Structure formats: C-alpha cells, structure tokens
Image (cartoon, rainbow, N blue to C red):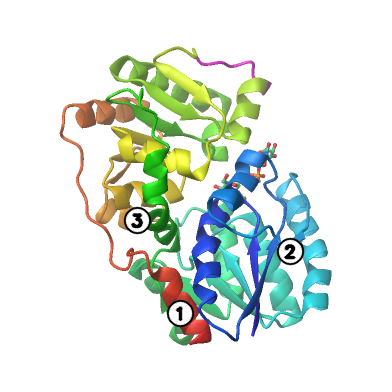
C-alpha cells in the first residue's frame, strides 16, 4: 500500500511525525510526504522536520501565503498532478488548516481514499476558518481518526457513518511524550522562577486592531505580576508592524521569534501559566498539567476544559488578568489527562490501516 501524507502548516508536523514512524513497522507500506508550502520560514517549518526527525518532503508545492481562496486554489491545482502521477492508495491529511481541506477536496474529486487524522473536532463557530476546514474535510473523508469521544459524537450528529470513524487518541501527545526528555534539555538555566508563556495568532485576536490593543495592555498588566515570554507568530508580527504597535521589550515582557518545537515544549513544562489562542497548546498544557488560559470564546477541544487545565477567558481582559492572579496565588484549575492521550495514538492508526 502506498500512502501519501500531506502537511503544510506548523501544527501539522507534530501530528504527522508519529504516524510516519508507526507505519515503518509494516513491511508492505510505502509512504511519502507532500509539503504544500503553506508555512515556509525556517522556524515555522524546517526546524520541525529536523527536530521531529521527519525526512525532507519528497514534494514541496511551495504555495506560500495568500488569501484563503488563493491559497486553497493553489494547493489544489498543484496537488492534483502529484496524486495523478504518484497514484497513492490512501492520502492522510492532518488537522484543520487550509492545506488539509484543499488536498481533501482533490482526493474526493479524483476518487482517492482519504483519511483525516484529528477528525470530529468542532468549535461550532463558523467565523473560524478552521471550522469550515474541519466540517468539509470530515464530510469528504473515508476514514476518520478522532482524538476524543466528543469527536465521535460530533461526526455521528453530522451523519458520518460510524463505520468510517475510529477513536484513535491524540497524535500530538504521541510526539510530546517522545520529545519531552529532549525538550527538557533545552530549558535555559536563567529562566525566571515564575513566568507567563504567551502565544497569540488567531485572526479574531490579532487582525482586530482595537482588541489587539486591549490584549497588549493586558500583557503589560500581567507583566507586573510575573515576566511574560511571548514568541510572536509571523501573522501577529505583521499586524503589530502594520499598525506601528510595539510592546515594551523589557525584562518583564520578552518578545521573541517563533520557537522550535523543543524550545517551546521546554518552556511549557516550566511555565506558571500559558496564555494562548492556539488549539494544540490547549492540549499540550492539559497533558502537562500546566494552567492554560485560552483567549477565545469557544474551543474545538472542549475536553481540555471539562477534563484538563484549560479555561476559556473569551474577550475579557479583566478576567484574563484575574485568572493569572489566581494561578499565581496557587488556586489554579487542576485537571487530568483524557483517555487515549497515551503516546500510542499513531500506532492505533497504523494498525487500523495496515494491520
Ligand atoms: C495557519 C492556520 C491555523 C494554524 C496556524 C498555525 C489556516 C486557515 N490557518 O494560520 O489554523 O493555527 O497556521 O501557525 O490554515 N507567514 C510567514 N511565514 C510562514 C508562514 C506564514 O511569514 O512561514 C505569514 C504570512 O504573511 C501569512 C501569515 O503569516 O500571510 C499567515 O499565514 P497563514 O498560513 O495564512 O495562516 P496562519 O495565521 O499561520
């Protein structure tokens, strides 16, 4: 069997890595990686291939950035000839980025079997581009691998046949478990004893100038309680630059370029609190038992709230600052690890496909 794995954006790489590894145990499986080129900076892409020991992609579609329509269309038209030529028996797509839906659509039109890893997650908020990508990809997929039970329930409600759906667990946690010892090696000796680790990149947060201003003010307030470490995503950096905004880059607020997988994971393990709008980080903090304050009104990963350490603070900076204060005072929300977030999800996926 010949399997094509599609990756394109930063959060895809740590999901595909364990699945690629797991298939190596099966003699009859050939596999290759297509990188769409949605993310292309060294620290948004190559460094993840290096650290996660993923072989360089056989094909890079080099689509780069653009509007949603441009990016999706470019990926589709450049991916189609690749699958026509290489004729994979199965294409595996990951997560919810534009690369996921674009290549899913190509497979559906060509009648090529499609598997979706991290299926079934729903924020029920169609203003999020990722929600559109999730809904469409799951309707098109022939095999759907969910990370948690809520994914199965969402798919059943949307009429996806239960025969196609397999509760596999969380592949992102597979990578975390494997890389944790190496991540700990990257922790700098001079880290502050307490600190808030911040990431913000959702269009709903960083593309809205007034709200971004409010968020920056909140970071300054948090900085009075404890140092803030803030690796800045390219989208956020652009938005700040376009509006001539800057944060005081002092001892209290440290802005930095996007970090590698190991460096960021190392920081998460030591953080007093994580403030984020990322999806994957809500999961990683839940696994690590680190308090997470999510600057969003909703989450497609509700299990991190019901079972884990995640709290949605919505668009309320007062609540955000108050919750940081609560964490500092030792009254942080506690949580447990959801079932099947055990480091073996990719093995279950490979066994379901090739076993
Ligand atoms: C994308 C995903 C989002 C994911 C995020 C993780 C979609 C719709 N969004 O959002 O779900 O959480 O990746 O990072 O697929 N840029 C660079 N260098 C890069 C990549 C991007 O400078 O290597 C800049 C470009 O100016 C680009 C902007 O960042 O226009 C946004 O990139 P894009 O891939 O469109 O969306 P993200 O915000 O990264």
Q: Name which residue lies at 69% across and 66% down.
A: 103
**Reading the chain from its start, which is encountered first: label 1 or label 2?**
2
Secondary structure under badge 2?
loop
Left or right: residue 309 compared with residue 196 = left
In the picture, the quarter occupied by the N terminus is bottom right
Q: Which residue is mark 1?
A: 165
Q: Start and end of the magenta stretch?
A: 242-247
- In the image, residue 165 lies in the stretch drawn in magenta: no
Residue 237 falls in image quadrant:
top right
Identify whether 109 is placed above or below 124. below
Residue behind mark 3: 302
- Figure disc tally: 3
Q: Main secondary structure of the magenta part?
A: loop
Image depth: mark 3 or mark 2 in front: 2
Left or right side of 184 for 336: left
Q: Distance of mark 3 from mark 1, alpha carbons?
A: 19 Å
Q: Quadrant of ligand 1?
A: top right
Residue 241 picture location, percent across and down: 65, 21
Q: Which mark is residue 256?
A: none
Q: Which residue is mark 2?
A: 58
Q: Earlier in the sequence, mark 3 or mark 1?
A: 1
96, above or below 158, in the image: above
Q: Gap in Å between the C-alphas at discs 1 and 2?
A: 29 Å
Q: Pointer 3: residues within 10 angstroms few (<14), some, or many (20+)? A: many
């Amino acid at each position: 069997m010949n399997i094509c794995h599609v990756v394109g954006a930063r959060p895809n790489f740590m999901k595909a890595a364990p699945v690629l590894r797991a298939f190596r145990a099966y003699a009859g499986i050939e596999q290759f990686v297509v990188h769409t080129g949605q993310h292309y900076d060294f620290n948004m892409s190559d460094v993840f291939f290096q650290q996660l020991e993923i072989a360089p992609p056989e094909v890079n579609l080099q689509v780069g950035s653009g509007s949603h329509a441009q990016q999706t269309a470019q990926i589709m038209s450049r991916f189609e000839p690749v699958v026509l030529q290489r004729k994979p028996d199965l294409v595996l797509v990951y997560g919810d980025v534009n690369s996921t839906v674009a290549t899913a659509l190509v497979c559906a039109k060509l009648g090529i079997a499609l598997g979706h890893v991290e299926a079934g997650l729903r924020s029920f908020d169609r203003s999020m581009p990722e929600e559109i990508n999730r809904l469409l990809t799951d309707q098109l997929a022939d095999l759907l691998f969910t990370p948690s039970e809520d994914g199965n329930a969402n798919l059943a409600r949307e009429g996806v046949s239960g025969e196609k759906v397999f509760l596999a667990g969380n592949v992102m946690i597979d990578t975390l478990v494997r890389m944790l010892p190496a991540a700990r090696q990257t922790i700098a000796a001079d880290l502050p004893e307490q600190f808030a680790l911040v990431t913000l990149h959702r269009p709903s947060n960083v593309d809205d100038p007034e709200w971004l201003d409010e968020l920056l003010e909140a970071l300054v307030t948090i900085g009075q309680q404890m140092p803030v470490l803030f690796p800045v995503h390219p989208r956020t950096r652009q938005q700040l630059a376009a509006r001539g905004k800057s944060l005081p880059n002092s001892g209290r607020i440290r802005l930095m370029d996007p970090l590698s997988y190991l460096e960021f994971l190392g920081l998460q393990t030591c953080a007093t609190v994580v403030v984020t709008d990322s999806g994957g980080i809500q999961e990683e903090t839940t696994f690590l038992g680190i308090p997470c304050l999510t600057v969003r009104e909703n989450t497609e990963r509700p299990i991190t709230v019901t079972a884990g350490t995640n709290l949605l603070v919505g668009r309320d900076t007062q609540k955000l600052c108050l919750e940081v204060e609560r964490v500092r005072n030792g009254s942080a929300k506690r949580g447990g690890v959801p079932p099947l977030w055990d480091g073996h999800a990719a093995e279950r996926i490979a066994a379901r496909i090739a076993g």
